[in-house]
Image: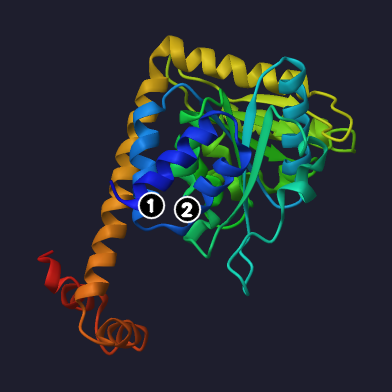
Amino acid sequence: MSKNNLDIDTLFAAATSGDRGALARLLSLIERGGAPAKDIARRAHRASGSGYVVGITGAPGAGKSSLTSALISHLRKAGERVAVLAIDPSSPFTGGAILGDRVRMQDHALDAGVFIRSMATRGHQGGLSVATSESVRLLDALGFPWIVVETVGVGQVEVEIVGKADTTVVVVNPGWGDSVQANKAGLMEIADVFAINKSDRAGASETRRDIENMLELTEFDEGEWRPTITLTVATSGEGVEDLWSAIRTHRDHLEKAGELGARRSARLREELREIIERRLEERARELCQGDRWDALRRDVETSAIDPWSAADEMLKGVGA
């Protein structure tokens, strides 16, 4: 057994026993990528499958972090353990997450039943860390029954989170109704539950009405889930119990309809596709002679060569 495997065995054993430092170390290895990350992912896959993943997404400033914190409080009062992955913008200097977990949800930092981790997007398209799937699976394998993934809320991340979550909560604010039409192709189509946060402000009822009207224009098959709309005030905890009830109701619906397994199978298929793409790119970079890779990229940018021809050249060595 290699030293690398031995170290990971030790970390796994410690993390399984509740060592938060060991869990943090495993997550850092996943973010870093390479052989250790693959080894951790393989081990976690064998032990995962019991945790339920809730995605919290929406526009910046909607109060996602405050709402996530309020949900944690609600779960802890019910005696539930919960892990949170907060996907943050990457620092342009270090590549690390700009926002730290203690800054975002410091009220829970010392609670042994809560584990919070900030993860950097590292420039990934859509803002979602490529390590999210592996990290979620690790937390699942280590026995967290509830895993919350909170997105940074930029680019395509609102859509991408659907591929990582069992239930997706879209957080909006009063006054958002004017933008419903523009957002229909994104947020409107991915929500399982809407949370109109800061609903103590003027315009909450109008926003609810606008979303309901938009849903009325959407065709739902018989037995298909129709997104629930809840009103919340994260700072006071108002409506959080209703939000949690909506999440549980959606879970019950998925399980009774047999859709939960189908969603998770689709998630694994998509993850397999992403892994193949990444490994093909890594292999192609290795085989592309000298600085040829960067030269071909520059040629595409200047239209000196078309993307398909450049891709043929880049993939020549892997036989694709």
Q: Where residue 90 is drawn, which disc sits there?
A: none
Disc 1 vs disc 2: Cβ atoms closer than 8 Å?
Answer: yes
- Which residue is the site of mark 1? 36
Q: Which residue corresponds to the image point at 78% horizontal and 31% vertical from the top-left?
A: 70
Three-letter amino acid code at disc 1?
Pro
Residue 223 seen in the current view: no
The answer to whether 27 appears left or right of 263 in the picture is right
Residue 42, picture quadrant: top left
Q: Residue furthest left?
A: 319
Placement of 269 over or under 216, stated as above or below: below
Quadrant for the C terminus, please: bottom left
Q: How many marks?
A: 2
- Circle 2 sits in a helix, a strand or a loop, which is it? helix
Q: Please tell me in which quadrant of the rendered image residue 117 appears.
A: top right
Which residue matches tag 2?
29
Q: CA distance from mark 1 to mark 2?
A: 6 Å
Q: Is residue 287 left or right of residue 75?
A: left
Earlier-in-chain disc, 1 versus 2: 2
**Residue 281 in sight from this viewpoint:** yes
Q: Kindly give the residue lying farthest to the top in the view shown.
A: 256
Residue 228 location (% of width, % of height)? 63, 23
**Residue at 49% in and 61% down:** 124
In front here: 217 or 38?
38
